[in-house]
Image: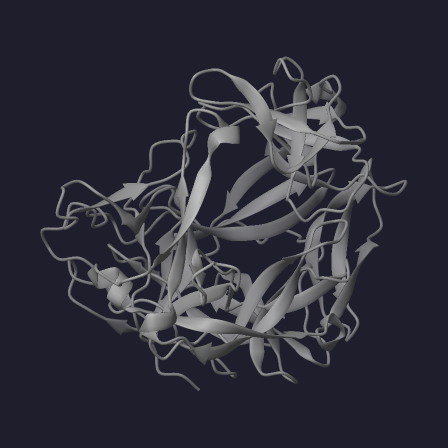
Amino acid sequence: MSPPPTVLTPGRCHVRATIALAVAVPMVGASSCRHGSSTDPLQPPAIDPSFGPVDPTPVLTAEAGSGSRLKAVWAIGPGGERVLRHWRDTKLDFNCLFSTAADGKWRCLPLHSVFPGAFHTDPACTVRAVAGFGGMGEKFVKMDASSCPPGVAIHRVGREVPGASRFRLVRHRRLLPSEDSSSCEAAPMTTEFERSLVVYEIGEEIPPENFVAGTLRREPASGPLAPTLLVGEDGSREFWLWSRAAGGGECVVGLAADGELRCLPRSVVGAFGAFSDSACGASAGTARTTSTCQEVELVRGPHKGRCPVLTSIFRGGKRLPTGYALGDSNGCAVASGVYFAMGEEVPPTEFVAARRRRWHASTGPLAIELQEVAGSSVRTEFVDLRFDTRCKAESCNDDLRCAPTTTLEVSHFYFADPTCSQPLADGPANVCPPRVAASVYPTKSCDERAFSWSGSPIKGRST
């Protein structure tokens, strides 16, 4: 049994809780947990310790449950609030989350796995490598797989690549996408962040059938939509999304084009500024370049420059032989990738209305966000009431905190000065201004990320 949370001096880390896991969590990532100081402007404001009356416990639909092999690991708040964090594969001894595997099936794939970046092991940049940190906790590499829907293949992390064999593919952007070029260059590690990286070979692929498979199962519905579980072959289960009670038509909650919260259809294709004609007049949908799909039913299109971001849904179509894009000079040119025809926009009123509300389970600083659709209610994530923002369980040196969900990241690639000593935070162009600090990429020893402020204490527990 774990010790009780330790109360620290206000204005420093505020409060702290130890990780109480029945299974171990591998430690990789950042070198320090920067929990701020008494002069940190991002510290929570002085507040009354009570946040008001406790809400009645809602009737929740489709709660997660462990199976014979996958064990649910929960993040537990100081007042007993809990959110499913991930699964523990007790046979293969790693944490995992369900995703589409290389065989097109839902499978619980390793949580601590990374995509290869720009590093290679040969001067022609034909053999890809993956970058990590000294004592790298990630044991797996994700590679896009040719499948429909697009999935990922899991490879093992291979041997360390010596410095003389590290090369990096450098892309040179031009006015037109057709004029872009790239070169393969030696990769000296010049910045502090780069020197903390270790480059590894990509090892053999692990056959997807080694990972627990899952299938979607609709629960009984009292309206047009049914809560749908992802059920593992070992009996594990978790809420996944909603689907039409009559079958098909999966959807997730989001802001529709009319500004209302609705259950919007999922799609592997998005509208991101591509076109189907050489005059760049007719929009096209874009999919991951490894997709083998030949037709899509719907295309999701976020409204750029809007805050909050609204999403339109368009009719889909067949795969296009060629796609086009506008360059900086407004020229229209052939673009590489996988593209699909787009039709008219679907009126947002065709989608079922939804709502989000907060369930305050205790008098502490954390609440649970609930999503409610067609009479069903499911828990989704934590909310820190002090900052009025969602937060996520993040771990650093056994200190598990509910850190804000941020829209900006200090990536160590952009700087405010020519000596590259003052890092900048960056993010997508159409996100809302952040309410709290940007997150920081890891550097050496922590299991996920370091943050520049202290979150609320939480514990981990497997069931």
Residue at 66 percent of width and 85 percent of height: 91
Q: Observer-nearest residue: 323 or 369?
A: 323
Q: Is residue 316 above or below residue 359?
A: above
Q: Is residue 451 shown above or below 270?
A: below
Q: Is residue 394 left or right of residue 312?
A: left
Position of the C terminus by quadrant: bottom right
- Across and down, in percent, residue 77 comes to 43, 63
Residue 10 relative to residue 195: left or right = left
Q: Position of residue 95 (x, y in %)?
A: 56, 73
The answer to which image quadrant residue 296 occupies is top right
Tell me which corner region of the image, top left, top right, bottom left or bottom right, holds residue 26: bottom left
Is 378 situated above or below 66? Answer: above
Nearest to the observer: residue 297 or residue 376: 297
As drawn, the residue found furthest toward the front would be: 124
Q: Residue 89 or 17: which is nearer the viewer?
A: 89
Q: Position of residue 126 (x, y in %)?
A: 53, 60
**Residue occupying the far left of the picture:** 39
Going by the image, does 227 lie left or right of 426?
Answer: right
**Residue placed at 33% from the left, 37% from the top?**
434
Q: Is residue 322 above or below residue 143?
A: above
